[in-house]
Image (spheres, rainbow, N blue to C red):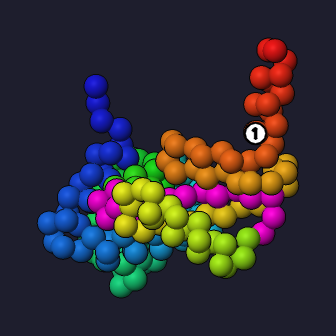
Amino acid sequence: MAKQVETVYGDALFELAIEENRVDVFYDEVRFLIQVLDENRDFMAMMTHPQIPQDEKLQTVDTIFKGKISDEIIGLMRMIVEKGHFSEIKSVLSYFVDRVKEYKNIGVAHVSTPMELTEDQKDRIEKRLLETTDYKSFEMDYKVDEELIGGMVIRIGDRVVDSSIRTKLYNLSRELSRA
């Protein structure tokens, strides 16, 4: 089975980052690049347009990014352009970010609550997650979900801890309907 584009390029960049001891530098630059791509839809449209010549796309990459990000990441972008895979650039970069988080033992927690949390509550949740998992740190993503009555739902990767009152009521009504 052929490897997917994101794993081929993402693994290559990750191995280079480890080899050159520049994981943090590449990680920061890749996150910056993802933000730039998200904010500039016209750039993405131009870079994936079949009528625009490849050499023009390569020149655009150099013009925009030279001196702003490392030559290695510019080289990766150029290679992706040359191979005709620019439409996959964001998945390549996201894959690399995920590899770095795994390597650095950084968890990503998505927390949904029925109302905005205070900074103290957020700190206590993060502290509790650090105590109960093997992660060294967390990137926390808080979201208000007004459909929750109380409690919270925490998702880390494919694991979900649901202590919401909505779910407890649902489970109780299922048990009662069986009785």
Q: Name the residue: 58% across, 75% down.
A: 123
Residue numbers of the magenta segment: 101-116
Q: Amino acid at mark 1?
A: Thr
Q: Is residue 39 left or right of residue 52?
A: right
For the residue pair 151 and 159, the one nearer the viewer reads as 151
Which quarter of the figure is the C terminus placed in?
Answer: top right
Q: With respect to residue 84, does 29 lie above or below? A: below
Place of residue 139 in the rendered image (x, y in percent of width and height, measured from the top left): 51, 67
For the residue pair 49 and 173, the one nearer the viewer reads as 173
Please indicate, yes or no, whether residue 46 appears anywhere in the rendered image. no
**Quarter-of-image position of residue 58:** bottom left
Q: Name the residue: 14% across, 66% down.
A: 19
Which quarter of the figure is the N terminus placed in?
Answer: top left
Q: Residue furthest top?
A: 178
For the residue pair 147 and 93, the one nearer the viewer reads as 147
Q: Residue furthest left?
A: 19
Magenta span includes 114? yes
In the picture of the structure, the residue carrying the numbered disc 1 is 167
For the residue pair 9 and 61, the one nearer the viewer reads as 9
